[in-house]
Amino acid sequence: MLLKKSNLVTAALLSSCLVSTTTIAGSEIALLIDMLRDNGTVSEAQYQRLQAELKQIQSQNQTSTQIEPPVQTTQAIKPVVVKAASDQFTAQLGGRLQIDAASYSGDPKMGNGTEVRRAYLTLKGTLSPDWAYRFQYNFADTGEDGKGILDAFVAYQGMDDFDVTIGNFKAPFTLHEATSDNFVTFTERASIAAFSPGRQIGAMISDNNDDRTWAIGAFGESVSQHGGEEDEAFGISSRATWSPLNQPRQVLHLGLGMNYQQTGSLDTVRYKQQAETHVAGVNLVDTGVINQAENVLKLGAEFAGVWGPFATQIEYVSTRVNRNKVDDVHFDGWYVETSYFLTGESRHYSQGHFARTIPFKQVGTGGSGAWQLALRYSELDLNDGAILGGETEAVTLGLNWFPTSALRFSANYVDVLSVDGGPNADLTPRLFQVRSQWSF
Amino acid sequence: MLLKKSNLVTAALLSSCLVSTTTIAGSEIALLIDMLRDNGTVSEAQYQRLQAELKQIQSQNQTSTQIEPPVQTTQAIKPVVVKAASDQFTAQLGGRLQIDAASYSGDPKMGNGTEVRRAYLTLKGTLSPDWAYRFQYNFADTGEDGKGILDAFVAYQGMDDFDVTIGNFKAPFTLHEATSDNFVTFTERASIAAFSPGRQIGAMISDNNDDRTWAIGAFGESVSQHGGEEDEAFGISSRATWSPLNQPRQVLHLGLGMNYQQTGSLDTVRYKQQAETHVAGVNLVDTGVINQAENVLKLGAEFAGVWGPFATQIEYVSTRVNRNKVDDVHFDGWYVETSYFLTGESRHYSQGHFARTIPFKQVGTGGSGAWQLALRYSELDLNDGAILGGETEAVTLGLNWFPTSALRFSANYVDVLSVDGGPNADLTPRLFQVRSQWSF
Amino acid sequence: MLLKKSNLVTAALLSSCLVSTTTIAGSEIALLIDMLRDNGTVSEAQYQRLQAELKQIQSQNQTSTQIEPPVQTTQAIKPVVVKAASDQFTAQLGGRLQIDAASYSGDPKMGNGTEVRRAYLTLKGTLSPDWAYRFQYNFADTGEDGKGILDAFVAYQGMDDFDVTIGNFKAPFTLHEATSDNFVTFTERASIAAFSPGRQIGAMISDNNDDRTWAIGAFGESVSQHGGEEDEAFGISSRATWSPLNQPRQVLHLGLGMNYQQTGSLDTVRYKQQAETHVAGVNLVDTGVINQAENVLKLGAEFAGVWGPFATQIEYVSTRVNRNKVDDVHFDGWYVETSYFLTGESRHYSQGHFARTIPFKQVGTGGSGAWQLALRYSELDLNDGAILGGETEAVTLGLNWFPTSALRFSANYVDVLSVDGGPNADLTPRLFQVRSQWSF
């Protein structure tokens, strides 16, 4: 119950504006009205009507002020402000919280448990016309891949043909990475996320239109890599998408991606993946450290479609590790997913990725929110030549409930169909996981 | 002096509202007044009075605008905003800083020093009607129990009988845990805090009324526990309170708590406690790791009373560790504290816990703030059977100064009266610690 | 392109204020105008003019509301607020991001790479009249000296003669430390930063006037030091500055600093420094741990001048380590830097330190921002007696571009001229580094 009062905060803030104003403007008018009555310009009846109107307005404001509960008479409500060097400066805060619980059966052994999967705060806006900034941090310490700086960049958006972005951000590659984890269909991305470059420090040019997007950038390593005597990895990533059909409830999306990375002084790479879960943190397939890796070339192909409440999405990623003095190795994977809104909504597509679901009828305004069923099949093959990381297939059944557009509750059942080779050969776990999420 | 200007920020922000408004409303009125004079409806004297009124209002607004110092003519002040998916969305920021210094004498050896004890930021509000959220983070890295996610939850408050909360939050147990560390009487909670479950990931139903509160929830482990092959601990926690007397300066509070926890795959528990201090980080009593622990049952009993400037508070906690194949062990502890406001204020009680002290006369408005004297006696017994963690008694004398309701300066003298058994048997340190605190 | 809409957020917020106000104030006026026409007090022509004026104002407000794009009809924009215990409470958010890339040649081996050098968020304001607070956190995890609490204090500013500050903040010492890293001339401070005390927990009295500043405080250790059995280091730091000439484009600055520190129970100190770079994280000179160090006395002398677009700055720091039973050691260093704004701006000096550069013509308003060339020579001598940390000289050439006052792009070329003694004796690396920075 504690938080309910904050409903009233903004109302009180705005009404304070109104009250002050009317009082000030009103005092002149009151004086004028009095004079006009005294002069006989307005009749007594007219005077009474004007007075009544004036009082009613003042009392309305009074009422809207009184919705602020009289808890502490000395408490005041103030907006948090930003002092900027330019009139065009803006600052906007965003937040995201994902709380998970998971239960596992079968081998390998994974511990049942709970996790704050993601806890993001984002500050973004414009520094001045054409200069955008964004800073985003993950406060959830989930071990290896958790806590730390996410988006951290400045972007110049003043040119007609493309934007320039400098800082730390997602290297453009694949549809499911371009889609925020808030809005992907299942609680975890498909197993080919093993090949995702993730966020890296770099510079990118890009252009996003409704029907076409393209981006190409040069990138170093992620922010979690510290300096030292060794040169960082360095690479190029690019992605282009085309939507020949792009209407609110009918979308056809095609995309291609290319990611090339020189491995830096260390000449090593490693690919690994959990069983499309995250709570236990146990890898199902894992190449281990691959030495003598000179560079890596990844290619991705994307297809997605939306037809009213139906949506489908297919992606394939190929990863070739070019090795020095030993045979190159080639890994790949793909997934297909389809989803259906029982309540009739459509997946929301925008500029090369999927976005927020807005329920037709939100809980709290007489509705029951949006309900979505989804099914996914995925493969990931980390076996090639001398490298036996494992090849795995899994199927996932998902149910999403969006009570409002800011809230999402998800339940996923993952059945690992097979694991060939690798550290967990022939072990096929099953798992059930749930998530509570708010984001704004 | 640097920060003084921020005094003026909000004033400027609001006055910008007023100025614009009056100008706009004023221009119609000015025109009307001119016309009425020209028509002879108002006399020249009346006209002068109306003009004077108009000018005075405009000049008042002018003045309130001019308090913004002309430092950088290009600097602009903007509110930080949140773009929400619902009209009912609200966001409110809170902060807390506690800076401590401590000096120790006697054994065991503890290093004199300083510490940022807590540095919290909180973002909370409502996502839409009936859905509240809260995210709170501790930025103070004080070692083992410091930095990390605190409250992180979503709560549904749309039902008449109870609220539902999902996420990471305090398991309901004991009065001194239910009371924010901002508002507890001494700089550190009494030694039975060794038994506090703290914040855990879980789901809870609860109902808080002025005279009665109850809460019961199922919980996993804290956010700082990462996954792995072992199952997490899992348990249930509940608390109920009753306030037969509940008036602003007269309170009688009774409470009961129950906390049950299965210890997960590892079958271990450990209880330890510092000498009601935190800067040195040295444990005075410590059971070490207790193996073969199947589950733990804790019971708590609470009593508190407020009579004008006097307040008292007593709590007892019993902890039974049920062990496999070896004898169970039982620990317990209790404390009694009493406090008195020299300046006449009362401890502020609300819905099962104590809350913020509002001084009668704040410093800066002619007053000297609120001054409070307090005394506490505490016991903690971690000796039972084969487990010798130590049994300790301590007395604490405290002085709190609240210059304003946002500020608190505290000085505590702790005298450890006895330590029987355990790693520091017969060592009885004394310590003096001070704290500077702001919170909003 | 995504962020461009946030340009409109504040406009919409403020215009909502205006619209509501005019409507309310307007309804009385409209009624009055109608009555006056009906009474024949104002003529039909006058009535039309009044009506036109009224409509124009309403339509202006209507227009300013319509700039909010109709993206999501359910999206609402709300300010983040703070509920304070006092009417005088204010909260202001600040941010800073520095993204670096560096390339190295010569020995010692340093890895080329990228880094988020600093990512700060700051929350500051006033709790009530005369009480200021500030909390600042560095989210950039760059290893040893990175992530953590920066400023975290409360300050009482209600006395005429001086302010009192309690918490964690920079111990007052040297001009280049008093100047924010946002506003120093080069990407990294000169090598004598090895002697900077940095931020420590303590209490300080200070007074900052335009022409004179002084500060003296007692300090413990930094927030990153945890407790334990050993006493913390403890010391005193002070600084005084005088500006006999202090005009917007003409400044003469003189300063003296003194920092004394007892080394605590451990009796150790260590001084080390990278090659005026940070990405690789490799120390060029390093005394290693110096034992039997009882206390350290540092003295600093400062000179700076601004003549229109020219600026120069010279500092010398002497550090004497008083050792127990072995010979004391003495280290020192100095630098001289000069800079010139090609576009005619002046370095901005304020109360004992340099501050934000405001370009004459910002990019986006027809200008090309401010361009600054700079040159620095620095020396650091960590060789004395039995301690051979190394003595190094370096020269740095820098170019800064400030497209707007919130943005800065810098390129620095550092040539290490010599290294005598120490772990990298006779190795003289060269390096090129670039930075993208936004700050507000």
Image (cartoon, coloured by chain):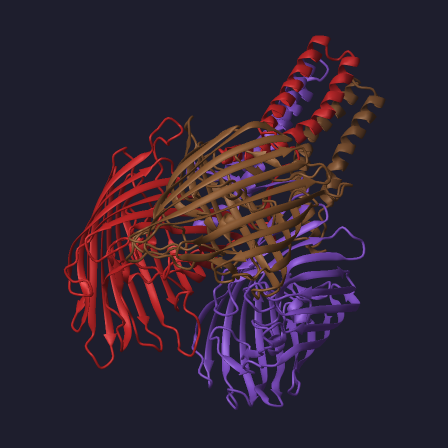
Chain colours: A red, B brown, C purple
In this rendering, the count of numbered labels is: 0
Image location (x, y in percent) of residue C216: 73, 65
Nearest to the observer: residue C69 or residue A85: A85
Taking the spot 25% from the left edge, 63% from the top edge, the residue there is A299
Nearest to the observer: residue A144 or residue B177: B177
Image location (x, y in percent) of residue B415: 62, 55
User: With B262 as the anchor, is C32 left or right in this view?
Assistant: right
User: With B235 as the anchor, is C274 left or right in this view?
Assistant: right
User: With C399 as the anchor, is C301 left or right in this view?
Assistant: right
Nearest to the observer: residue A129 or residue A140: A140
* Residue C156 visible here: yes
Image location (x, y in percent) of residue B280: 56, 62
B163 to A173, vertically: above or below: above
* Residue C344 visible here: no
- Residue at the right extreme? B45
C195 to A53, vertically: above or below: below
The answer to which quarter of the image holds residue C59 is top right
The answer to which quarter of the image holds residue C35 is top right
Nearest to the observer: residue C346 or residue B100: B100
Taking the spot 35% from the left edge, 55% from the top edge, the residue there is B268
Image location (x, y in percent) of residue C318: 68, 80
Which quarter of the image is occupied by the C terminus of chain A?
Answer: top left
